[in-house]
């Protein structure tokens, strides 16, 4: 596996691959890999001739009081794991190469970014779409794979790609969970043993909501309140519980097949998100 550090070298590599007629698959990440990331890499490997993984803790998607400084990192372990998945290139640029001092452009998707996580993280999605747009320009992928755990992020990126007529196939990959149901996240390392147990309320809430929609009609506000009560029993702080359409992210009053239960909570100091397409098998 090749490790590439600068955007210019990355683009030179991509241009060669394109001239050779190869399909490039990209997995954008912020590193500290877990099985969720590795499954995205394998998916990209199935869809493309060459797989590029970007590893960049993107400073502009973190708010002032967020965890940029302590975001978990382990570069040598990440290199080994990516190599084991058959990744061709790990692109790991430095912040000053991605955002030189004179850079002053942001790519902003409006509407979809305003609710859910966008409410408590102003500027977050502009940071995400800006870095993803830059990665698409630098790496020129035919397809890019994103996890469905950040389902609002996925919807926002799909919108950006459609709005900008970008010829990149966006692939949403299912959430990968620990055996007890906790959605995998690099931030899970922040959890103490008792916080980790409390965090399982997210998966229990999903199980409850799934059972409710299967055993008879239930109104969205009723289900939402039941989920909130279940989460509060664990003593976690709720940021939001919402039942929304998976593409428009608009709240559903009457549950439709496109309903997604989306949740963000704080367990101690750690913010966790989870979601589920309630009517999927
Ligand atoms: O999902 C992430 O890890 C990040 O938001 C992404 C897409 C790599 C952009 O920095």
Image (cartoon, rainbow, N blue to C red):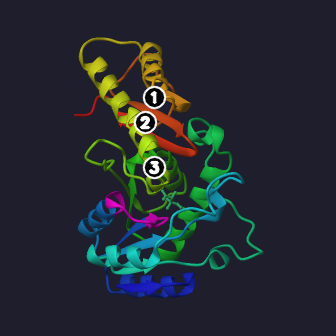
Residue 198: which disc?
2
Mark 3 or mark 2, which is nearer to you? 2
On the image, the x and y values in percent for residue 114 come to: 63, 38
Residues drawn in magenta: 28-37
Residue placed most toward the observer, 276 or 35: 35
On the image, the x and y values in percent for residue 193 come to: 41, 46
SS at circle 3:
helix
Residue depicted at x 50% and y 69%:
73
- Going from N to C along the chain, the mark reached first, 3 or 2, is 3
Residue 80 lies, with reference to residue 265, above or below; the image says: below
The residue labelled by disc 1 is: 234
Q: Residue furthest right?
A: 102
Residue depicted at x 39% and y 86%:
2
Circles 1 and 3, Cβ within 8 Å, touching? The answer is no
Disc 3 residue crowd, few under 14, some 14–19, many 20+, Cα 10 Å: many
Q: In the rendered image, which quarter contains the N terminus?
A: bottom left
Residue 215: which disc?
none
Disc 2 residue crowd, few under 14, some 14–19, many 20+, Cα 10 Å: some
Quadrant in the picture for residue 201 = top left
- Going from N to C along the chain, the mark reached first, 1 or 3, is 3
The residue labelled by disc 3 is: 154
């Amino acid at each position: 596996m090749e490790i590439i550090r600068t955007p210019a070298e990355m683009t030179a590599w991509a241009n060669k691959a394109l001239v050779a007629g190869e399909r490039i698959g990209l997995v954008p990440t912020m590193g500290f890999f877990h099985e969720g990331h590795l499954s995205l890499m394998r998916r990209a490997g199935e869809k493309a001739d060459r797989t590029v993984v970007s590893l960049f803790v993107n400073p502009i998607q973190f708010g002032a009081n967020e965890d940029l400084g302590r975001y978990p990192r382990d570069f040598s372990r990440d290199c080994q794991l990516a190599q084991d998945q058959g990744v061709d290139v790990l692109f790991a640029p430095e912040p000053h190469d991605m955002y030189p001092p004179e850079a002053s452009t942001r790519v902003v998707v409006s509407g979809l970014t305003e609710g859910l996580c966008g409410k408590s993280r102003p500027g977050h999605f502009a940071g995400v779409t800006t870095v993803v747009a830059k990665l698409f320009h630098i790496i020129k992928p035919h397809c890019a794979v994103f996890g469905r755990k950040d389902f609002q992020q996925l919807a926002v990126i799909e919108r950006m790609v459609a709005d900008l007529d970008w010829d990149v196939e966006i692939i949403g990959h299912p959430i990968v969970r620990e055996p007890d149901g906790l959605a995998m996240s690099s931030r899970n390392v922040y959890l103490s043993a008792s916080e980790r147990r409390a965090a399982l309320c997210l998966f229990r809430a999903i199980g409850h909501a799934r059972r409710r929609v299967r055993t008879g009609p239930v109104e969205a506000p009723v289900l939402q309140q039941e989920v909130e009560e279940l989460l509060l029993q664990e003593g976690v702080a709720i940021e939001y519980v919402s039942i929304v359409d998976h593409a428009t992210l608009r709240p559903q009053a009457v549950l439709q097949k496109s309903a997604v239960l989306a949740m963000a909570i704080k367990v101690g100091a750690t913010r966790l998100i989870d979601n589920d397409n309630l009517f999927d098998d």
